[in-house]
Amino acid sequence: MDLIPAWVDGTLRPVEKLAVHQRGLRHKAVSVFVLAGERVLVQQRAAHKYHTPNLWANTCCTHPHWEEGDLACATRRLAQELGITGLDLRSVGQVGYRADVGNGLIEDEVVQIFTAQADPDLPLALNPQEVQAARWAPLAALMAEIAAHPARFTPWLRLYLADHRAQIFGGPDI
């Protein structure tokens, strides 16, 4: 059973991941953006994921296990999902959001955001259980693509780019 940190009656407790989403409980999460200059590495979620399958998301996003640190979680999931190791992850702060992710499931997350710079030739080893594709996208082009076809992207990526660009990418909003 995959237990993640969620707030129940105002107290952080270990709760089974699917139950967290079914009940719409506020819970901890991490998101990673791997950057190469003005480009960001995005992933397309695997077709069999229990929510938001086939949608494009940021480089990596997940929930820490109960009592797992945010940085350890981000490092673990980059390796598990994309085969990425050895990057210098930097925390750029926390954001919160609540979004319907379909099938009666709710993400209500307090997210620790990490960024890392990488070479665009960074070797990837996609885990087909998690990721079906990955690509580098110039940030401005990604934002235009999201504006033109929002249903192709996860709710959290749309929210991150709409509301938290300066925090994530540094500098003024585009």
Image: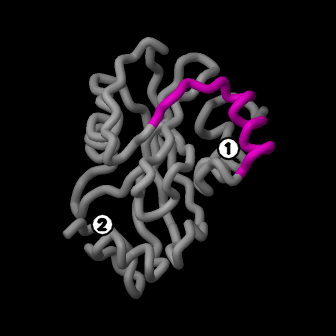
Question: How many marks do you count on the picture?
Answer: 2
Q: Position of residue 24 (x, y in %)?
A: 49, 78
Q: Which mark identifies residue 161?
A: 1
- Most extreme residue toward the bottom is 9
| Cα–Cα span, label 2 and label 1 | 25 Å
Does residue 55 appear to the left or right of 59 in the view shown?
right
Region in magenta = 133-150
Q: Which one is in front, 35 or 125?
A: 125
- At a point 56% along the width and 28% down the height, the residue shown is 40
- At a point 34% along the width and 33% down the height, the residue shown is 126
- At a point 30% along the width and 66% down the height, the residue shown is 4
- Most extreme residue toward the front is 47
- At a point 22% along the width and 60% down the height, the residue shown is 67
User: Where, quadrant-wise, is the N terminus in this rendering?
Assistant: bottom left
Q: Quadrant of residue 7?
A: bottom left
N-terminal-most mark, 2 or 1: 2
Q: Position of residue 13 (x, y in %)?
A: 29, 76
Q: Callout 1: few (<14), some (14-19), or many (20+) C-alpha neighbours within 10 Å?
A: many
> Where is mark 2, residue-wise?
4
Kind of residue at disc 1: Leu
Q: Which element carries disc 1, helix, strand or loop?
A: helix
Q: Contact (CB < 8 A) between labels 2 and 1? A: no
Q: Which element carries disc 2, helix, strand or loop?
A: strand
Kind of residue at disc 2: Ile
Q: Which one is in front, 119 or 128?
A: 128
Q: Is residue 98 above or below residue 127?
A: below
